[in-house]
């Protein structure tokens, strides 16, 4: 699939009026996350977690800076910065992840006699689908409801980590935090000069030119 | 961090500069160089109906300045030319009012139409026409000849026409949006009242040219009606309309600052006073109107200061100018009140003069 926002790099806004020091600091920290650093997950959990992330948001296109999904979730769990709410059927965030990853591995072993990260992508997808639909029946799930774990933890934490990263912003043409500079051309189909330009068919070159000037 | 001291300074300058210019002794103003406002004020007082009578008001002025005035008056104004001088200077003051209005339109439409990305080619036209109107008006203010000027008059006609066409375009812009004629679209699409400022600049300019053209022994008239009353009526309606526009926009801003009430209170009063002055030959009323119009003129300048403060209050303040100048309160809008008030003052002089002659 061709790029939708060719040549757009949200980080070019870094030193413009669009961002202030607080914004720069937060984004710098996010971009600097070491993809291999894990302080919450142990080695086994880490292997499973990386495999899960690969299946939930596969990053197949070669990218200079792929989103370090597993490390971002690890960072969230390590700092234990919660969402501010909890679903009653699920245990607290950290506990849910530990139990859920262990249950995924157990599910893989009972079905294929191998650990989750050793399975083929199709086998992994089948297990994740079973978790999503509530068909995962390994006793390791115990009191953790698989469907809720999938919808409220796996999707929630991994997908929101993905779209919190500048690499994903470039992909979808998002401008990052509007802090302090927001947008002034609010109508449909209008674009501020510091906004990503979309390559609708026939205007790919124009979009690339406009994106080169974003900043 | 913001620096309130800088902002205070900007606001203070925005208030103090024009205050000095408008209220300063004319004799001082006559010394003070060639700036637009100052040169207008100078003639404003040189040519009041009291001309030729002992000028008690200038007693505070420095003796040298008084002497300077006297010299000029001898040179320029032999008694039989006083009336011609009156219509000429009033014409020039009206040109000045039109200049202020067209400057406001130029800056405002440039900023707002840039924001609208000049989506429609017609969005360039107010820029072009207001540049021409501004040029014609400045030329008119500087032009000491009494006669009407053909090119100026033509430009003013074009400005009036462009303003009216703009009204149509802006109405179309509102109506074509989902919801049509709704408060939301009145607030957020093309401002319905804005093009009228250009139309008013054109009308006042045309009035200026008619007044200049007054025959030596005739009455100043516009479209066959007494010029003073006619122009006072136009200006009064302009003030009311501009106050309506400010009211709409300040309502959108929820009157979050008490100062936002000023342009919806002072100019409507000025409008009513000017309308009443056009109908009633009452000296006391005229005096109140004159002072209220001066207050309104001052308010137009002060508004720029208030709007600058408003820009600084938006997130990122002045450092975030590329958003806040567009998104915050428009800096160029308030001086429309000044332009109209100056025109109102000129109209008032014409009315008073017509009464003294009658």
Image: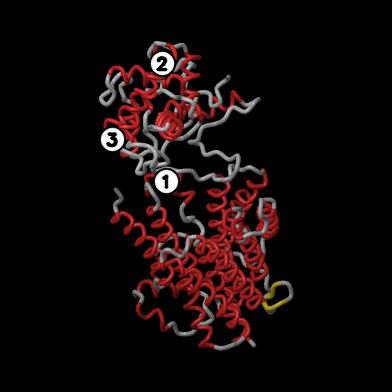
**Residue B270, x across and y down, in percent:** 53, 76
Q: Quadrant of the C terminus of chain B?
A: bottom right
Question: Is disc 2 placed on a helix, strand or loop?
Answer: helix
Horizontal side, residue B355 vs residue A181: left or right: right
Q: Are marks 3 and 2 on the same chain?
A: yes
Which one is closest to the eye, mark 3 or mark 2?
2
Q: Which residue is mark 2?
A: A110
- Whether tag 3 and tag 1 are in contact, CB under 8 A, the answer is no
Which one is closest to the eye, mark 3 or mark 1?
3
**Label 3, label 2: how many angstroms apart (C-alpha)?**
31 Å
Q: Give me the chain letter of mark 1.
A: B
Q: Which residue is mark 3?
A: A80
- Residue found 59% across the figure and 27% down from its top: A199
Which one is closest to the eye, mark 1 or mark 2?
2
In the image, is residue B5 above or below residue B40?
Answer: above
> Which label is found at residue B276?
none
> Which label is found at residue B321?
1
Can residue A164 be seen in the rendering of this structure?
no
């Amino acid at each position: 699939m061709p790029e939708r926002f060719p040549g757009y790099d949200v980080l070019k806004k870094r030193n413009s009026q669009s961002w202030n020091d607080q914004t720069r600091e937060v984004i710098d920290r996010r971009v600097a996350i070491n993809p291999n650093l894990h302080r919450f997950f142990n080695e086994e959990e880490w292997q499973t977690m990386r495999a899960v992330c690969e299946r939930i948001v596969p990053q197949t296109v070669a990218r200079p800076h792929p989103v370090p999904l597993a490390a971002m979730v690890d960072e969230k769990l390590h700092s234990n910065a919660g969402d501010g709410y909890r679903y009653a059927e699920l245990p607290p965030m950290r506990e849910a992840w530990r139990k859920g990853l262990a249950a995924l591995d157990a599910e893989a072993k009972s079905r294929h006699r191998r650990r989750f990260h050793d399975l083929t992508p199709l086998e992994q997808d089948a297990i994740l689908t079973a978790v999503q639909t509530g068909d995962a029946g390994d006793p390791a799930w115990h009191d953790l409801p698989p469907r809720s774990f999938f919808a409220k933890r796996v999707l929630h934490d991994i997908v929101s980590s993905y779209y919190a990263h500048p690499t994903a912003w470039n992909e979808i043409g998002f401008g990052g935090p509007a802090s302090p500079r927001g947008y002034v051309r609010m109508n449909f189909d209008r674009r501020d000069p510091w906004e990503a330009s979309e390559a609708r068919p026939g205007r790919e070159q124009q979009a690339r030119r406009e994106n080169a000037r974003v900043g | 961090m913001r620096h309130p001291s800088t902002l205070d300074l900007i606001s203070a300058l925005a208030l103090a500069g024009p205050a000095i210019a408008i209220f300063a002794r004319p004799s001082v103003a006559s010394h003070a160089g060639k700036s637009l406002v100052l040169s207008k004020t100078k003639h404003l007082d040189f040519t009041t109906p009291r001309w030729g009578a002992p000028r008690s008001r200038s007693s505070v002025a420095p003796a040298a300045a008084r002497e300077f005035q006297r010299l000029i008056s001898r040179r320029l104004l032999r008694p039989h030319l006083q009336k011609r001088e009156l219509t000429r200077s009033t014409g020039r003051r009206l040109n000045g009012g039109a200049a202020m209005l067209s400057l406001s339109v130029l800056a405002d439409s440039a900023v707002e139409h840039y924001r609208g990305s000049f989506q429609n080619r017609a969005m360039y036209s107010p820029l072009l026409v207001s540049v021409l109107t501004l040029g014609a008006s400045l030329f008119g203010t500087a032009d000491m000849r009494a006669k009407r000027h053909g090119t100026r008059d033509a430009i003013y006609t074009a400005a009036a026409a462009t303003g009216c066409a703009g009204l149509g375009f802006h109405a179309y812009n509102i109506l074509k949006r989902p919801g049509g004629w709704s408060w939301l679209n009145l607030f957020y699409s093309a401002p319905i009242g804005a093009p009228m400022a250009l139309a008013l600049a054109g009308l006042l300019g045309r009035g200026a040219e008619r007044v200049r053209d007054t025959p030596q022994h005739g009455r100043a008239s516009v479209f066959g009606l007494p010029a003073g009353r006619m122009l006072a009526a136009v200006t009064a309606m302009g003030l009311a309309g501009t106050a309506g526009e400010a009211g709409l926009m300040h309502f959108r801003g929820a009157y979050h600052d008490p100062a936002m009430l000023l342009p919806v209170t002072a100019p409507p009063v000025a409008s009513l006073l000017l309308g009443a002055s056009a109908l009633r030959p009452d000296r006391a009323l005229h005096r109140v109107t004159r002072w209220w119009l001066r207050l309104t003129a001052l308010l137009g300048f002060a508004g720029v200061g208030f709007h600058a403060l408003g820009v600084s209050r938006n997130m990122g303040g002045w450092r975030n100018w590329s958003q806040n100048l567009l998104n915050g309160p428009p800096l160029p809008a308030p001086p429309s009140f000044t332009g109209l008030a100056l025109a109102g003052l000129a109209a008032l002089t014409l009315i008073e003069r017509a009464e003294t002659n009658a």
